[in-house]
Image (cartoon, coloured by chain):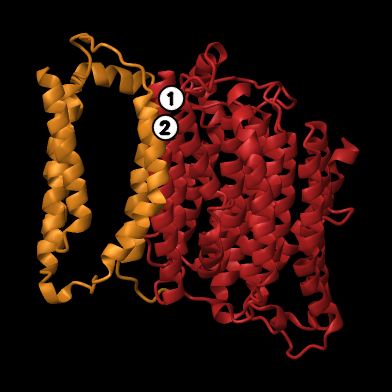
Chain colours: A red, B orange
C-alpha cells in the first residue's frame, strides 16, 4: 500500500492524461477549457505530491515496488519542480494557442504523459525502469516538438531530436546491459552492494557500462560534447514545449543522474575527474554559443547549456554519504522559475507565429509595458546570478559546495563563466530599457500567461529567500 | 561445442543482417535482411534457454511487426526512381566509422577482459511461460505496467503526427 502512496502524484497526472485523451474525441471541447483542466490536474498533482511524504531529511520508504523505485526528500522536491513546470507550461500553451492555431486536446495530454515519465525518472532506482521512463518522457516530447506540422523548421527540429535521442537511448541500453553483466543486477541497491565488496576499476564491464549510461545522461542535458543539437531543437520547438523541455527534462535527468552517481564512492571518484572537464567545457562552450545569438529562444537554449555546466559542478561536488541533493535541487528550482518566467512573457509578447523573437524586437519594451519588462529583467538577473534573486543563491550554494569538496579551480571557473554570461543576459535588459520603442507591443487574446509571469517573478525572490527563512 | 558453433553462426548472421539493413538501397531488401537479424537473435535466445522470448521474438518481431513493415513498403510501391540520390554515402559511412571506431575498440577490449566462465544448466522453469510470468508479475510488475504508458504515448503520438487534422478552432 505504501508503494502506491509514493506514486500517487504520478497516478493523478497519468489518469489526467488518459482522461484528456478520451475527452479529445468530443466535438465541442474548447481550447480554453482543456488548458484549464490540465492546469487544474497539474495543480492537484502538485498538492498531492506536497502532502504524500513526511517532511525532513529521512527517506520515508527507502525502496518501493521491490527496489524499482526510491523515494526521498530529493525525489519529492524534484517531482514538485516538474509538476510546477508542467503547470506553467500549460499556462504558456493556453496563451500561445490564442495566437497560434494548431492546438488540439492531445497536446495537453502528451504534456501530462511527459510529466508522468519525468516523475518516474526522478524515482527510478533500476535500470530497466529508468529506460522505460526515459522513453516515455522522450517520446512524448518528440511528438510535442513536431506538433505544428505546417512548418519545416519544426520538422527539422523533431528529426534531429528523434535521431540523436534514439542514439542516446541505444547508448543507455548498451550501458545497462554491460552493468548487468558486471554486477549481476540492474537494481541500484544491488549494484551498490556489489561495488561495496568489489573494486570498481577491477571490473572493466562496469566501467564501460557506467560510461555509456553517463554519456546518455550527458546527451539529454546537452552537456559538452553532446550539446550541438540543443540550439536548433529548442529554436524549432513550439514555445510552450521549449519551456517545458528546458526545465522539466533537465530536472528529471539531473535527479536521476544524481541518484545514479551516488551509487558508490569508488565509481563516483573515477567519473568525477572526467565530469570536471565536462563541466568546464560545457560552461564555456555554452557561453560562446550564447554570446553569438541574436534570437532570444536560441540564446535561452545556449544559456541552458551553461546552466547544465553549473549543475555538473554540483554533481562533481556531491558526496555519496548522506546524500541529500539539496544544492542540485535548489539550483534546478531557481533555473526553472527564471526560464519559465521568460517563456511566459514571450508567450504573450511573441505574437502570431512567434514573430518577435530576436533581441532587436524587444527594443524599448520598458516604455510600453513596464511591468512585463520589469519581470523579464528579474528573470534575466536571476539567470545571471545577481543578488538577491534565486539564481544568485543557487550559484552561491554550488560554488561553496565545490569549495567544500576541494574543487577550488572549478569554483573559480564557475564564477568566471557566470560573469561572462552577464553579457547576453544584460544585453536584453539594455535593449528593453535604454532604446526607444519602435512598436506598440499589442497583444491579442485573453490569457493566463501574464498571471504566470507575475507568480514566477515573485517566486524568483521567494525561492531566493527560502533558505533565509528556514 | 555445438552450442559454440551455433552461437558463432547466429552472431555472424545477426550482424550481417544488420549491416544489410544499412547498406542495401531498396527498403524491401533492407527489411528482408532485417528479418534475418531478428531470426538469428531468436536463435541466440534459444541458446540461452529463454524459451518464451525465443517464441515471442519469432512470432511478434519476425512475424507480426516485420510483416506490417513489409506491407507498408509494398503499399508505397517504391521503385528505383523514388529512391534518393545516395552517391556519396560511402563518404558518410567512412566518417561514421572513424567516429565510432574508438568506442568500438574500447568495448572490444572490455569484452576481452571478461572472465571466462563455464556454462551451467539452468533449472527447467527458467525461461518458460510460467517462470517468466512469475517474475514479471511479482518483482517486475512496475516496469511491466509502465510499458503500457509508453505504448499509449506512442499511439497518441502517431495519431497526432500522422492523423488528419480538421481545422479545429
The answer to whether B37 is drawn above or below residue A20 in the figure is: above
Q: Secondary structure at mark 2?
A: helix
Given residues B113 and A245, the one toward you in this image is B113
Image spot of residue A58 (x, y percent): 70, 21
Given residues A436 and B18, the one toward you in this image is B18
Q: Quadrant of residue A452?
A: bottom right
User: Given the current orientation, which residue lies at the most extreme bottom position?
Assistant: A438
Given residues A434 and B1, the one toward you in this image is B1
Image spot of residue B75 (x, y percent): 11, 65
Q: Disc 1 marks which residue?
A: A186
Q: Chain of mark 2?
A: A
The answer to whether A46 is drawn above or below residue A358 in the figure is: above
Picture quarter with the N terminus of chain B: top left
Which residue is at 69% across, 83% downward?
A: A361
Q: Disc 2 marks which residue?
A: A176
Q: Residues within 10 Å of mark 2 (few under 14, many from 20)?
A: many
Which residue is at 49% across, 17% downward?
A: A190
Which residue is at 42% across, 76% downward?
A: A152
The numbered mark, 1 or 2, whose residue comes first in the sequence reads 2
Disc 1/disc 2 C-alpha distance (Å):
7 Å
In this rendering, position of residue A258 left or right of residue B158: right
Image spot of residue A184 (x, y percent): 40, 18
Which residue is at 60% across, 56% downward?
A: A246
Q: Is residue A365 visible?
A: yes
Q: Is residue A447 visible?
A: no
Mark 1 near mark 2, Cβ–Cβ under 8 Å? yes
Q: Which mark is residue A318?
A: none
Given residues A163 and B129, the one toward you in this image is A163
Amino acid at each position: 500500500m505504501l508503494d502506491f502512496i509514493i506514486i500517487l502524484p504520478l497516478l493523478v497526472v497519468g489518469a489526467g492524461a488518459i482522461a484528456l485523451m478520451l475527452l479529445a474525441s468530443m466535438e465541442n471541447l474548447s481550447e480554453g477549457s482543456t488548458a484549464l483542466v490540465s492546469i487544474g490536474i497539474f495543480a492537484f498533482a502538485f498538492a498531492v505530491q506536497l502532502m504524500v511524504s513526511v517532511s525532513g531529511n529521512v527517506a520515508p520508504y527507502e525502496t518501493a515496488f521491490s527496489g524499482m523505485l526510491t523515494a526521498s526528500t530529493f525525489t519529492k522536491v524534484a517531482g514538485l519542480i516538474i509538476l510546477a513546470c508542467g503547470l506553467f507550461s500549460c499556462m504558456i500553451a493556453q496563451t500561445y494557442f490564442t495566437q497560434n492555431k494548431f492546438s488540439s486536446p492531445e497536446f495537453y495530454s502528451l504534456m501530462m504523459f511527459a510529466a508522468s515519465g519525468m516523475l518516474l525518472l526522478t524515482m527510478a532506482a533500476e535500470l530497466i525502469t529508468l529506460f522505460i521512463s526515459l522513453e516515455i518522457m522522450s517520446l512524448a516530447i518528440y511528438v510535442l516538438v513536431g506538433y505544428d506540422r505546417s512548418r519545416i523548421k519544426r520538422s527539422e527540429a523533431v528529426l534531429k531530436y528523434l535521431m540523436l535521442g534514439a542514439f542516446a537511448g541505444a547508448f543507455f541500453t548498451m550501458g545497462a546491459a554491460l552493468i548487468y553483466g558486471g554486477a549481476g543486477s540492474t537494481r541500484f541497491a544491488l549494484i551498490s552492494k556489489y561495488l561495496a565488496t568489489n573494486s570498481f576499476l577491477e571490473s572493466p564491464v562496469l566501467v564501460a557500462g557506467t560510461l555509456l549510461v553517463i554519456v546518455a545522461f550527458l546527451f539529454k542535458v546537452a552537456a559538452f560534447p553532446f550539446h550541438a543539437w540543443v540550439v536548433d531543437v529548442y529554436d524549432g520547438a513550439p514555445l510552450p514545449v521549449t519551456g517545458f523541455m528546458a526545465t522539466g527534462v533537465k530536472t528529471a535527468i539531473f535527479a536521476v543522474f544524481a541518484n545514479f552517481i551516488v551509487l558508490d564512492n569508488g565509481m563516483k571518484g573515477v567519473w568525477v575527474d572526467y565530469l570536471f572537464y565536462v563541466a568546464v567545457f560545457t560552461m564555456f562552450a555554452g557561453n560562446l554559443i550564447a554570446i553569438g545569438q541574436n534570437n532570444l529562444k536560441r540564446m535561452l537554449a545556449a544559456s541552458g547549456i551553461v546552466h547544465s555546466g553549473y549543475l555538473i559542478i554540483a554533481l562533481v561536488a556531491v558526496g555519496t554519504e548522506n546524500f541529500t541533493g539539496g544544492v542540485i535541487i535548489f539550483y534546478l528550482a531557481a533555473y526553472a522559475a527564471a526560464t519559465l518566467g521568460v517563456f511566459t512573457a514571450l508567450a504573450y509578447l511573441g505574437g502570431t507565429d512567434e514573430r518577435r523573437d530576436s533581441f532587436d524586437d524587444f527594443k524599448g519594451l520598458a516604455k510600453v509595458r513596464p511591468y512585463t519588462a520589469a519581470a523579464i529583467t528579474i528573470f534575466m538577473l536571476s539567470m545571471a546570478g545577481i543578488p538577491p534573486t534565486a539564481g544568485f543563491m543557487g550559484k552561491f550554494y554550488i560554488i561553496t559546495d565545490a569549495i567544500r569538496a576541494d574543487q577550488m579551480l572549478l569554483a573559480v571557473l564557475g564564477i568566471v563563466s557566470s560573469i561572462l554570461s552577464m553579457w547576453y543576459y544584460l544585453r536584453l535588459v539594455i535593449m528593453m530599457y535604454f532604446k526607444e520603442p519602435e512598436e506598440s507591443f499589442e497583444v491579442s487574446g485573453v490569457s493566463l500567461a501574464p498571471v504566470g509571469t507575475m507568480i514566477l517573478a515573485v517566486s524568483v525572490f521567494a525561492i531566493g529567500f527560502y533558505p533565509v527563512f528556514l | 561445442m555445438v552450442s559454440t558453433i551455433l552461437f558463432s553462426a547466429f552472431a555472424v548472421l545477426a550482424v550481417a543482417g544488420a549491416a544489410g539493413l544499412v547498406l542495401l538501397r531498396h527498403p524491401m531488401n533492407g527489411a528482408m535482411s532485417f528479418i534475418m537479424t531478428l531470426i538469428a537473435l531468436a536463435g541466440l535466445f534459444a541458446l540461452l534457454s529463454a524459451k518464451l522470448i525465443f517464441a515471442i521474438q519469432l512470432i511478434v518481431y519476425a512475424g507480426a511487426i516485420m510483416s506490417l513493415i513489409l506491407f507498408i513498403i509494398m503499399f508505397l510501391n517504391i521503385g528505383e526512381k523514388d529512391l534518393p540520390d545516395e552517391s556519396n554515402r560511402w563518404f558518410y559511412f567512412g566518417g561514421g566509422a572513424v567516429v565510432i571506431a574508438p568506442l568500438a575498440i574500447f568495448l572490444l577490449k572490455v569484452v576481452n577482459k571478461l572472465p571466462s566462465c563455464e556454462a551451467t544448466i539452468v533449472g527447467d522453469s527458467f525461461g518458460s511461460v510460467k517462470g517468466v510470468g512469475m517474475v514479471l508479475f511479482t518483482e517486475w510488475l512496475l516496469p511491466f505496467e509502465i510499458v503500457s504508458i509508453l505504448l499509449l504515448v506512442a499511439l497518441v503520438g502517431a495519431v497526432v503526427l500522422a492523423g488528419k487534422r480538421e481545422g479545429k478552432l
